[in-house]
């Protein structure tokens, strides 16, 4: 039986560099942001497109190969800028929950990412009309508090040196205290955050996983120790910090792997200083799962006893129950120290 | 992986046929198809409809895998100082001049060619044509539309040699033959790189012919339903992912079945064995 060979150094010789090609929607040339980005990538091949979806939505793209060397698509977002948040995601203090996608796709390559089920391309799309997003948010937030995870389909912090989106949201949040944002990340880019003062309505959220999970299934992302260091530095600086153990992957020996992980977190992070902690098992809308499966054939993540529960897929109840039983002492300890939100 | 060349003209194809020592497949009637080992070449004729038909024809007949490579190579018309006569250009965007639809070959390979977009016309374009563009041909969009149904977009390449400067006299066959001969080695080296890249980055499970035969025999013996077969294949993939890379010997533990109860019993036994 033949399967995927791991990327050898031989194939690396033949792969182009990331962002060697930048596709630019004709309309995007009206925005200064487009020129700022294209100047950043001076040596890249620029290709004009009439509609970014002609590139991004094409069928038969090799998603996994594009992940190794993504290209960039600069486009103008049209239509809706804000969407109602999913029931499968954690909200925030009962506020109206929306999400937006200033950037689609991510530099990290996580086997379990729901984006594998959503899109046929791993190329990064950046909507250059950022001001339109802020206008939409300001309009929606009139007279009420709202909550927006801004890293919904990407990890913004890891690309902050290019797109500078966190910088703009920081300014916006200082001016608009009723707009509460969550910046979820796996990055250890604490230097970026150190440039800004903590703001009450910005929640920094780190996804943490056991090192074995990170090295096996969260490719290109920083190891656990670096993320823990970033979390602690953010806490020391006075930021509101959320930890996210999401998704928990019930692979072989998951109980043992996560026991060791929980011990590490409890000993290395002052959990009582956290804003809260999210815990969730892998789950995915059924509509995405089929596409996800076709892209994830080589990952052990895929091979579990799945249960189709309503409109989403998750682990079987028995499997989850077994895990929760073994994790109980730790979850109790976390609950004693901070607020714990479950999505199980 | 298989490597397919699509050429519109015999003069474009001849250098490849000679360099690769391809033999004509006498049982292929719709289009002239040449082959040796995993190399195939099809001469489509001029125009995007023929090019699309030839592409679909040869891929249907011979392609086994979305990781196969297809290269549409031939001469093109040029009208820009950015491209020199006789230069091979890798196409990164195709615009069909009838529909104005855009197509984007997904270039992931590292290469040394110049890149440019091309416009596919239904009829020959000359300098006096009001709609002339910088780089033109008559096949690319047809090949792309057909090939993209079968292959990964990053495995579909368009290598066009600039020859025709859109003069109304057109181009002579000897000129085509000459310029393609000058570029054939470069294109073949590129094809080899593309093939190596595809082989080393295949993200699909493929059973060998021998394993497929064994599985087929087993399924026949057990008279499995489609969903039962899918479950067995899923477990075999899981075994592979967890490091058990050879197909287990299942024939000796499973008995032939004659009814549904026996099938269920043997199926459960097989699942337990594989789990």
Image: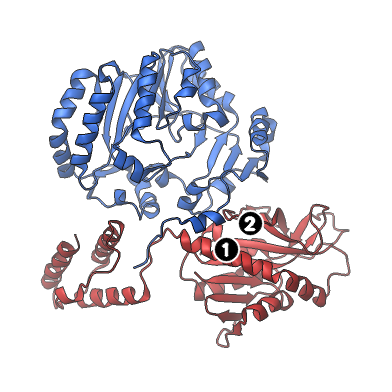
Chain colours: A blue, B red
Is there one chain holding both mark 2 and mark 1?
Answer: yes
- Compared across the picture, whether B269 is left or right of B61 comes to left
Residue occupying the far bottom of the picture: B26
Relative height, residue A46 to residue B79 (above, below): above
Q: Characterize the local packing of mark 2: few (<14), some (14-19) or many (20 or more) Cα atoms within 10 angstroms.
A: some
- The quadrant where residue B244 appears: bottom left
Relative height, residue B109 to residue B58 (above, below): above
Question: Disc 1 sits on a residue from what chain?
Answer: B
- The quadrant where residue A6 appears: bottom left
Q: List x then y, in percent, for residue A62.
A: 49, 54
Q: List x then y, in percent, for residue B81.
A: 83, 53
- The label number, if any, that marks residue B111 in the structure image: 2
Q: List x then y, in percent, for residue A299.
A: 33, 52
Q: Residue at x 32, y 26 (%)?
A: A243
Camera-side residue: A278 or B168? Answer: A278
Which residue has dot 1 on it?
A: B193
Q: Residue at x 79, y 62 (%)?
A: B77
Asked if residue B47 can be seen in this view, the reply is: yes
Camera-side residue: A206 or A99? Answer: A206
Question: Disc 2 sits on a residue from what chain?
Answer: B
Pointers 2 and 1 in contact (CB under 8 A)? yes
Q: Residue at x 53, y 26 (%)?
A: A165
Q: CA distance from mark 2 to mark 1?
A: 9 Å
């Amino acid at each position: 039986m033949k399967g995927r060979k791991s990327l050898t150094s031989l194939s690396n010789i033949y792969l182009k560099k990331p962002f060697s090609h930048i596709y630019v929607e004709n309309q995007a040339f009206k925005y200064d942001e487009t020129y700022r980005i294209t100047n950043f990538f001076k040596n890249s091949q620029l290709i004009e497109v009439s509609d970014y979806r002609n590139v991004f939505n094409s069928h038969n793209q090799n998603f996994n190969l594009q992940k190794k060397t993504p290209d960039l698509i600069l486009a103008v977002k049209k239509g809706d800028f804000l969407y109602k948040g999913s029931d499968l995601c954690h909200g925030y203090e009962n506020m109206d929950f929306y999400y937006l996608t200033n950037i689609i796709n991510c530099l990290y390559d996580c086997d379990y990412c729901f984006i594998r089920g959503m899109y046929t391309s791993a190329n990064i799309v950046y909507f250059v009309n950022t001001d339109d997003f802020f206008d939409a948010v300001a309009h929606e937030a009139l007279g009420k508090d709202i909550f927006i995870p801004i890293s919904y389909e990407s990890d913004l912090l890891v690309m902050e040196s290019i797109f500078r989106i966190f910088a703009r949201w920081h300014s916006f949040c200082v001016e608009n205290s009723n707009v509460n944002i969550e910046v979820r990340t796996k990055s250890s880019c604490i230097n970026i955050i150190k440039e800004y003062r903590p703001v009450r309505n910005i929640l920094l959220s780190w996804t943490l996983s056991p090192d074995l999970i990170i090295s096996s299934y969260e490719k290109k992302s920083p190891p656990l120790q670096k993320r823990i260091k970033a979390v602690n530095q953010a806490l020391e600086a006075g930021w509101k910090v959320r930890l996210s153990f999401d998704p928990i992957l019930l692979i072989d020996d998951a109980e043992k792997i996560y026991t060791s992980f929980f011990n590490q977190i409890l000993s290395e992070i002052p959990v009582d200083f956290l804003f809260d902690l999210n815990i969730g098992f892998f789950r995915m809308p059924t509509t995405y799962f089929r596409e996800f499966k076709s892209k994830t054939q080589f990952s052990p993540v895929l091979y579990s006893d799945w249960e189709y529960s309503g409109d989403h897929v998750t682990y079987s109840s028995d499997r989850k129950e077994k895990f929760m039983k073994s994790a109980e002492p730790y979850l109790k300890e976390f609950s004693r120290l901070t607020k714990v939100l479950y999505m199980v | 992986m298989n490597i397919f060349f699509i050429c519109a003209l015999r003069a474009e194809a001849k250098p490849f046929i000679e360099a690769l020592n391809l033999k004509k497949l006498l049982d292929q009637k719709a289009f002239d198809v040449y082959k040796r080992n995993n190399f195939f070449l099809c001469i489509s004729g001029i125009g995007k409809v023929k090019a699309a038909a030839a592409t679909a024809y040869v891929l249907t007949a011979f392609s086994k895998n979305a990781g196969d490579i297809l290269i549409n190579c031939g001469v093109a018309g040029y009208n820009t100082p950015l491209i020199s006569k006789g230069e091979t250009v890798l196409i990164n965007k195709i615009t069909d001049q009838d529909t104005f639809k855009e197509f984007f070959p997904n270039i992931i390979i590292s290469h040394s060619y110049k890149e440019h977009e091309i416009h596919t016309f239904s009829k020959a374009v000359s300098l006096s044509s009001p709609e002339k563009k910088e780089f033109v041909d008559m096949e690319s969009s047809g090949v792309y539309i057909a090939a993209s149904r079968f292959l990964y977009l990053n495995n579909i390449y368009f290598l066009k040699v600039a020859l025709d400067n859109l003069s109304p006299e057109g181009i002579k066959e000897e000129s085509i033959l000459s310029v393609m001969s000058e570029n054939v080695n470069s294109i073949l080296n590129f094809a080899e790189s593309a093939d190596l890249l595809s082989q080393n980055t295949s993200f699909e499970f493929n059973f060998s012919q021998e394993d497929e035969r064994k599985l087929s025999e087993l399924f026949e013996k057990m008279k499995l339903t489609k969903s039962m077969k899918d479950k067995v294949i899923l477990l075999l993939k899981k075994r592979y992912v967890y490091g058990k890379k050879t197909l287990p010997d299942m024939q000796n533990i499973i008995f032939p079945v004659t009814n549904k109860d026996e099938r269920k019993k043997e199926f459960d036994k097989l699942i337990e064995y594989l789990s």
